[in-house]
Image (cartoon, rainbow, N blue to C red):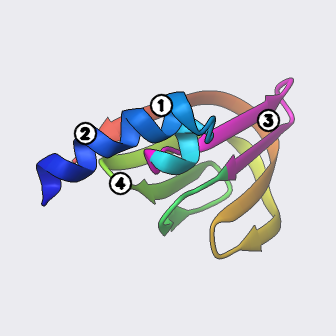
Amino acid sequence: MKKLQQGIRPWLIKYLALPSDIVLELPRITIIGQLHVYIENHKGLATYSETELKLKINKGFIQITGSGFVLKMMLPEEILLEGTIQEVKFVPE
């Protein structure tokens, strides 16, 4: 069944023009300067402090480091972080 899903996903992206981030369950990250990070399609909050945010994604985590972090918005699959962003990295499981 898993092989069938892997074969169907590229077809859906190519022929039905579905967004690849949705079909492949990838996070979408929008960074505005060094001040805001907006992340969609995450699986939940793992760590939050004034200097670090860590979100669960399908194959690991997204880790954001910096200072003065404030969560401006948090929905089940979306988050808006404000502060001074120094680094955004993907951490595999």
Number of numbered discs on residues: 4
| Side of 22 relative to 91 (left or right) | right
The image's mark for residue 58 is 4
Q: Amino acid at mark 1?
A: Lys
Mark sitting on residue 7: 2
The amino acid marked with disc number 2 is Gly
Q: Where, by quadrant of the figure, is residue 41 drawn?
A: bottom right
Q: Is residue 40 left or right of residue 57?
A: right
- Disc 4/disc 1 C-alpha distance (Å): 15 Å
Residue 70: percent from left, percent from top: 80, 59
Q: Which mark is residue 66?
A: none
Question: Which numbered dot is residue 84?
Answer: 3
Please tell me how crowded label 3 is: few (under 14), some (14-19), or many (20+) other residues with Cα within 10 Å: some
Give the mark nearest the N terminus, 4 or 1: 4
The residues colored magenta run 24-39
Disc 1 from disc 3: Cα separation: 15 Å
Q: Could you tell me which residue is drawn at 63 percent across and 67 percent down?
A: 77
Name the foreground residue: 92 vs 63: 92
Q: CA distance from mark 3 to mark 4?
A: 26 Å
